[in-house]
Amino acid sequence: MTIRRVLLTGGAGFIGSQCADAFVADGDAVTVLDDLSSGVRAQVPAAAEFHAIDIRSPEAARIVREGRFDLVVHCAAQMDVRKSVADPRFDAQVNIDGSLNLLEALRASAPRSRFVFASTGGAIYGDRAEPPTAESAPTAPLSPYGVAKLSVEHYLGYYARVHGLDAVSLRFSNVYGPRQDPHGEAGVVAIFCDRLLDGAPLTVFGDGRQTRDYVFVLDVVQAVRLAARAKFGDAADGARAFNIGTGRETDVITLATLLSAAAAAPLRLEHAPARAGEQRRSAVRPAAAARALGWRPSTTLEEGLRHTWSWFAARRAGAAR
């Protein structure tokens, strides 16, 4: 198989680092960009070339222009929904301006790159459509984070139509698994794992019956690998977007129950007031990804939670030694 030159932004983070592992294992020449604001340097595979830089920087643009990459996987993002609400300008600077910095550099170098964008399914559809939501459903983001991700998808459509960019957006549902950061808003599974390890009750906001579509991180990595090599016909509008999720809704109380069982811990919940503006239901329909990419989730929630709990427990045990 021909060795590809692969650029991964956010390649020290939760999803990006595991994509980097996969591409290195595939024999690709991998370059990682990450400013380490939330990523972890030790998670970058040793075989990858690493640059600790911001995607908004001139240096990032230079690397893209000169790298002649066959594949760009764009995972770098400001991913905290609450931070996007508190500071929408900063969210737009990272998620929109940072993406445009990369896209303009690609346009200037005119390579035959495929651009795979880590978008969101959980944050762009809103509450208008009945879950599981298909890609054709109306988009109505409830946060600046969702607005920014959808905006980048529209920019990708523009660059595809006008400049011939080979672009694919993957709309991830709620991704969980090893290496997820338990600090901050992103990742209730990681937060719950930390609470269980501390012997603390699990905090549930509101009645706990709000639902999400939880997809295991290694299934997401496989979707990225398939999107990187898929053969597509010409899209009429130049844009391609695929939901990456299970199509199943799981409410927070059920999630807490399953994770407590995986940890062999008693279920202890504490309720907090509902958070204003929180989406009530969310799940994405992955049928288009099955048809176009040959992708289907292969990890059950129970299995994924066991793997995730084992990783968090082992990490805590290692830190204690």
Image (tube, helix red, strand yellow):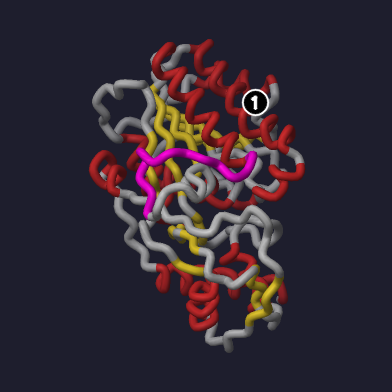
Asked if residue 249 lies left or right of residue 17, the reply is left
The amino acid type, in three-letter code, at marker 1 is Asp
- Residue at the bottom extreme, as displayed: 266
Disc 1 element: helix
Residue 154: % across, % down: 48, 26
Against 241, residue 43 (above or below) is: below
Q: Residue at x 70, y 80 (%)?
A: 200
Q: Quadrant of the C terminus?
A: bottom right
Q: Nearer the viewer, residue 303 or 59?
A: 303
Against 242, residue 269 (above or below) is: below
Q: Is residue 62 magenta?
A: no
Residue 255: % across, % down: 51, 72
Q: Nearer the viewer, residue 256 or 63?
A: 256
Q: Residue at x 53, y 86 (%)?
A: 264
Q: Is residue 135 magenta?
A: yes
Mark 1 lies on residue: 97
Q: Which of the 4 image quadrants contains residue 2?
A: top left
- The residue segment tinted magenta is 132-144
Q: Quadrant of the N terminus?
A: top left
Q: Which of the 4 image quadrants contains residue 269?
A: bottom right
Against 139, residue 25 (above or below) is: below
